[in-house]
Amino acid sequence: MFTLVQLRCFVTLAEELNFRRAARRLNMSQPPLSRHIQALEHEIGAELVARNRRSVELTAAGASFARLSQRILDQAIDAYRQTRQIASGDAGEITISFTALSSYAFVPSLVALLRKHYPSIALTLREMTTPQQLAALASRQVDICLLRPPVALPNIRTTRVLRERLLAAVPAKHPLAKRRQINIREFDGSVLVTYPPVEGPYFHGMVTGLFQAAGVYPSAIQYITQTHAILGCVAVGVGLAVVPESAKGCAPAGAVLRPLIGAEGVHVDLVMASPVETTNPASASVLALVEKHLGSRGRATAAA
Amino acid sequence: MFTLVQLRCFVTLAEELNFRRAARRLNMSQPPLSRHIQALEHEIGAELVARNRRSVELTAAGASFARLSQRILDQAIDAYRQTRQIASGDAGEITISFTALSSYAFVPSLVALLRKHYPSIALTLREMTTPQQLAALASRQVDICLLRPPVALPNIRTTRVLRERLLAAVPAKHPLAKRRQINIREFDGSVLVTYPPVEGPYFHGMVTGLFQAAGVYPSAIQYITQTHAILGCVAVGVGLAVVPESAKGCAPAGAVLRPLIGAEGVHVDLVMASPVETTNPASASVLALVEKHLGSRGRATAAA
DNA sequence: TCAATTGATGCAAGATAGGTATCAATGTTC
DNA sequence: GAACATTGATACCTATCTTGCATCAATTGA
C-alpha cells in the first residue's frame, strides 16, 4: 500500500507540474520526490505523470488519482482534527438519560448550557424510569443520568443538581384550591394520589414518611407512576397529591399547586450520576461544566 | 502525519480488541503492532485504546477515529483500483467529436459498441464542424474525431470507419421522384443545392468534381452548410442535391433519395482521427476496439 | 499457588528515506 | 551554433525507522 507522504508528494507535484518547485514546497530536495513518485507509480502499476525530459504533465490516470489523493489527504487531516477534539472533550457524543419530571425542571437549562459552551458535542437525550436508568448506568449505556437518589452502584459518582420543595396538588374545583397555602393536615381523610413503592421508591418513601411524621392518614391511596399522570388524576377530582415544585411545568388546568405547610424541612433532590471513570472525554467536559455552573449558582435553585 | 499502515493496524485492532489476534491478522508480530498504535496515539496526541493490562477497549476518540480510518482506507484502495482501471483503459473519460451527419451514420453504433465493451468509460460527445474538429484535435481538446478527410495535421493518425455511396436527393413532387434511380445527367439545367467550398471542402470538391467529370452543368448552385439543411431545401422544391447514403437518417418527408447513376466509382469516407500519442488510455482502448470491430466487418459498411 | 495470557520493552538486523553530488537531455540566449 | 541554464533521473552515503526475537511485568483462571 502506498503512503500518505507519497500522496502528499504527488498532489503537490500535480499542482506544480515541476519536480523542483514541488520539492521546494514540500521542504525536501528533488531526488527523494522523484523516488516517491516512482514508487507510487510502481505501486499502482501505472504511469501517473508523463515526463518529456523537459515538461511534466498528468496522464488521465494521474489526473484522476490526484483528485482522489487530495480527498484522502483532506479526510486524513479531518480525522486528525476531529479525533483531537473528541479526545479533548470539545466535541463528541454524549448520552444523557433523564426522568420524565426532570425534563421540566433541569433538562432545558442543561441543554442550553451545553449548546452555549460545547456546540460541537452531539447530545442524545433519553427518557427513562429510574430503575432503567440504574441499569443503563451500570452497563455504561449512558454517560450521565439525571435521576432521584439514592444511587447505590459501585464506581458511580453523583452530584445534586436540584433541590425542590414539595407542593400540595388539589383539584381546581376543590374548596382547598381557594387557599393560598395548604396544611398537610387537610389531607386527613382525603384520597391521596401518589407514587407506587416499587416504581417510584424515592417519592413514595418521602410522601409516606411525611404523612406518618405529621400523623395524617388519607382515607385511600391511589398509586400512579408518573407525576404528570398523578396531576391528571388530581385535575379530574380523584384526590389530592404531594408533588415536587418542578411539577408546575406539567400541571394541567384542572389542578392547582399550593405551598405545603408542615413539610418545611423536607425536600426532594435531583442528582446527576455518572461513572467515576469514563472513556468519553465529552462526558467529563459536560460534568465539569455542570458542576462549575452549579457551584456559581449555589446548586439549590429550582428551574422555572 | 500518520501512515496508512498505522491506520490499517488501528482498524484491525479496533475490530479484534486484542493485540496478538490483530497482529496475526496483519501478518506481523505483536510488538510492532503495539509500537504502531503508540506512534499513532502520540501523533494524534490522544489515547485511542484504553488498555487495562488485560482487556483493550476503544475510547470515544478511538471509536470515532476507527470509523474515519476505515473510510480513509476504503478510499485509498478505491483510488488504487480506479486508477489502475483508468490506466489500463478499462475506465476513464473520453471526448469524441463528430460532424452532424455522422451522428446518423456512425455515432449510434459507436456508442452501442462502447457501452457493450467498456461500460465504465464515461463518454462525452461533442458536435462540431470539420474546421472546429481540426482545431480541437490539434490542441488535444478531444480524444477522437469523426470527420471527413483529409486530415492534414502532424502526429494525427486516421482510420476510415465508413465508406458510403452518393445518392440523389429530389423533391417528392418532382417528376424524377418516380424513378427507381436517377442518372446524374438529369441534374443538367436544374438548381443544385450543395456544400459550400470553405465550410464543407470535402463534399464540395467531391460533388463539383463529379459534375465536371460527367459534363453536367446545373443552372444554379445554392450553397448550404449542413446536410439536413440541404435536404430541407430539396424538400420544399429549391432544387436537387447529391448527398451521402447516411443522409437517409435525416431526410425530411418532402425529399426522396434515389441511387445515383454515373457516380459508381465515387464514394465519401468518414474517418476517425486521433493523436498518435495520447495520455488517455481509455482513448487507446476505444480506438483499438473500433478498429478491431471494423476489421471484422470489412470497414466499409454503411450504417442504417 | 501455578500456569497461561495479556500488552510493553530491549536489542540487533534489515529496510527505508533523505541529502549531496552528478548525469544526460533539452531549451534558451547571444 | 556554441555556451549556458534547467529539467528529471541516478549513485552513494548516512540517519532513521521498522521488524522480529526474546523477555518482562501484570493479570486472570484453574
Image (cartoon, coloured by chain):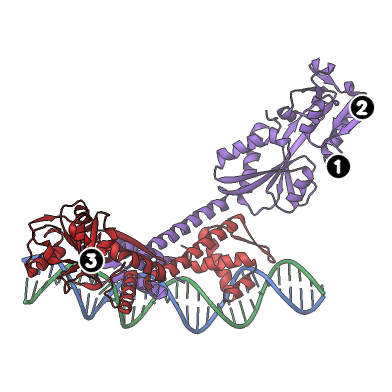
Chain colours: A purple, B red, C blue, D green
x, y percent for residue B135: 19, 61
Amino acid under disc 1: Val
Is residue B74 at least partly visible in the picture?
Answer: yes
x, y percent for residue B140: 24, 64
Q: Secondary structure at mark 1?
A: loop
Q: Which residue is mark 2?
A: A218
Q: Nearer the viewer, mark 2 or mark 3?
A: 3
x, y percent for residue A294: 66, 36
Left or right position of A236 against A216: left
Q: Chain letter of disc 3? A: B
Q: Nearer the viewer, mark 3 or mark 1?
A: 3
Residue at 30% over, 78% down: B295
Q: Which residue is mark 1?
A: A198
Q: Quadrant of residue A8?
A: bottom left
Distance Cα–Cα, label 2 vs label 3? 115 Å
Q: Secondary structure at mark 3?
A: loop
Question: Tag count in the figure?
Answer: 3
Whether B196 is drawn above or below A107: the answer is: below
Amino acid under disc 3: Arg
Disc number at residue A189?
none
Q: Which residue is mark 3?
A: B180
Both on one chain, marks 3 and 1?
no
Which image quadrant: the C terminus of chain A? top right
Whether A251 is drawn above or below B270: the answer is: above
Left or right position of A160 against B125: right
Distance Cα–Cα, label 1 vs label 2? 20 Å
Whether D1 is drawn above or below A147: the answer is: below
Is residue B149 at least partly visible in the picture?
Answer: no
